[in-house]
C-alpha cells in the first residue's frame, strides 16, 4: 500500500452518499485485512459488517456528544479481552481505513462509552468486547476547493501535501511534537533525517485522533523513540488507547520500508525522561 500518499490525503468522512460499496471491494478489504500486520499477536478479532439500519439503532448512543454518523455501512470490531486488546484493534481498524481510502472508500471513527450497551442495541450476542465502530461509504463531494499546503520545509521529498478544504483539520508541526533526548528540547528536523525518522513524524502528525487533540509527543533518545500521550479529562481511556494505536500504525507504516522491524513496546523504558504530569509515557520502540 502506498501509505505516504494515502496518509497525505485521508480525512474523516462524515457525510456519505446514499450508495452502497460493492461486495468485490469489501472482499478486497477482507483479503487485505486477513494478511495485515497486527500490533499484538494471538488476540482473536472478529469484524462484522452492518448496513444503514445501525444509524437508527445507535442514534443517541454513539459518536461525539452522542451524535451518530449516518452511513451506508459500518464495520464493527469485536475482540477477545486480553492485554492491549483495544490498541490491537485500533491498529487493525485504522489500517483497514487506510486501505479503504486507497479503494476510494471513506470512513470515520465513531466513539462510544459503553460497548456492552451498543452490542445490545445492535443485537450482537458475543462474549467478545466491542472495540471499534467505523462508519464507511462514499463521500458526498462538496463544492469546496482543493488546496495545496506547502509543508516542504519539513518534507524531505519537497512534495506538496494535498489538503481538502471542507473538513480537513489542522495539525501541529514537527517541532511541536518531537523532542530530542529530553522533554522540551525541540527536535531539529535535520537531525531527525540523520536518524532516518523524519518521515515517521512528518506523516505521523497527520494521524487522526479523538477530537483532533493530537495528543502525541515523542522523545528521540539516540536509537529509542519514546511515545507520550497528553492526559485530557474529556478523553476516555478507550479513546486514549485508540489514539496510541493509530500513531503506532502510522509510524510503522511510513518507516517500515526504510527501517526494518520497528516494534512498539507498551509501558515505560528504564530511564526517567521527566515527563510533566499532564503527559504519560505509553510506549517506546527501538529504531
Ligand atoms: C478514537 C477516535 C474516535 C473518534 N470519534 C469520532 C466521533 O465519534 N465522531 C466524529 O465525527 N469523529 C470522530 N473521530 C474523528 C476525529 O475527530 C478526526 O480524526 C480528527 O478530528 C482529525 O480529522 P481528520 O481525520 O479529518 O484528519 C474519532 C477519531 C478517533 C481516533
Image (tube, rainbow, N blue to C red):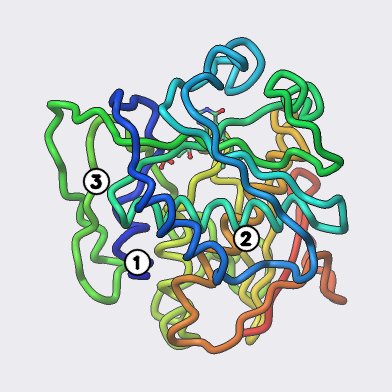
Q: Are marks 1 and 2 in contact (CB under 8 Å)?
A: no
**Label 2 environment density (alpha carbons within 10 Å; few <14, some 14–19, many ≥20):** some
Residue at 21% across / 50% down in the picture?
149
Secondary structure at numbered mark 3: strand
Check disc 2 and report the residue beneath it: 184
According to the picture, the residue beneath numbered tag 1 turns out to be 4
Residue 282 % position (x, y): 76, 59
Report the front residue among 199 and 41: 41
- Nearer the observer, 12 or 47: 47
- Which tag is nearer the camera, tag 3 or tag 1? 1
Q: State the residue at coordinates (49%, 28%).
A: 51
Please state if 77 lies on the left or on the right of 256 as rendered.
right
Q: Give the residue at the far front of this rendering.
A: 23
Query: How much space separates mark 1 and mark 2, taking CA atoms?
Result: 28 Å
Q: Which secondary structure, mark 2?
A: loop
In the picture of the structure, the residue carrying the numbered disc 3 is 163
Structural distance between the alpha carbons of marks 2 and 3: 29 Å
Residue at the image point whose x is 57% and y is 66% from the top: 34
Looking at the image, residue 211 lies above or below residue 93: above
> Which image quadrant is residue 168 in?
top left
Query: Mark 3 vs ligand 1: CB under 8 Å?
Result: no
Q: From what the image shows, is residue 190 above or below residue 106?
A: below
Amino acid at each position: 500500500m502506498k501509505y505516504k500518499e494515502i496518509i497525505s490525503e485521508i480525512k474523516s468522512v462524515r457525510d456519505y452518499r446514499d450508495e452502497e460499496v460493492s461486495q468485490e471491494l469489501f472482499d478486497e478489504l477482507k483479503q487485505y485485512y486477513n494478511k495485515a500486520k497486527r500490533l499484538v499477536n494471538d488476540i482473536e478479532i472478529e469484524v462484522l459488517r452492518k448496513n444503514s439500519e445501525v444509524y437508527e439503532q445507535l442514534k443517541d448512543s454513539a459518536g461525539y456528544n452522542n451524535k451518530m454518523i449516518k452511513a451506508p455501512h459500518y464495520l464493527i470490531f469485536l475482540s477477545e479481552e486480553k492485554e492491549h486488546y483495544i490498541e490491537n484493534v485500533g491498529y487493525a481498524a485504522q489500517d483497514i481505513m487506510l486501505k479503504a481510502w486507497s479503494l476510494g472508500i471513506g470512513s470515520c471513527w465513531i466513539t462510544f462509552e459503553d460497548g456492552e450497551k451498543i452490542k445490545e442495541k445492535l443485537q450482537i450476542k458475543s462474549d467478545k468486547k466491542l472495540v471499534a465502530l467505523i462508519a464507511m461509504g462514499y463521500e458526498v463531494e462538496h463544492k469546496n476547493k482543493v488546496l495545496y499546503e506547502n509543508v516542504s520545509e519539513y518534507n524531505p521529498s519537497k512534495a506538496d501535501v494535498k489538503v481538502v478544504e471542507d473538513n480537513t483539520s489542522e495539525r501541529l508541526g514537527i517541532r511541536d511534537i518531537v523532542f530530542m533526548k529530553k522533554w522540551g528540547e525541540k527536535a531539529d528536523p535535520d537531525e531527525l533525517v540523520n536518524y532516518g525518522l523524519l518521515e515517521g513524524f512528518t506523516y505521523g502528525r497527520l494521524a487522526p485522533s479523538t477530537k483532533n487533540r493530537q495528543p502525541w509527543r515523542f522523545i528521540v533518545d539516540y536509537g529509542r523513540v519514546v511515545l507520550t500521550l497528553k492526559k485530557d479529562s474529556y478523553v476516555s481511556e478507550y479513546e486514549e488507547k485508540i489514539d496510541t494505536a493509530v500513531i503506532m500504525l502510522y509510524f510503522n507504516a511510513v518507516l517500515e520500508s526504510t527501517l526494518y522491524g520497528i516494534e512498539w513496546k507498551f509501558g515505560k523504558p528504564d530511564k526517567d525522561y521527566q515527563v510533566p504530569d499532564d503527559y504519560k509515557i505509553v510506549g517506546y520502540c527501538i529504531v
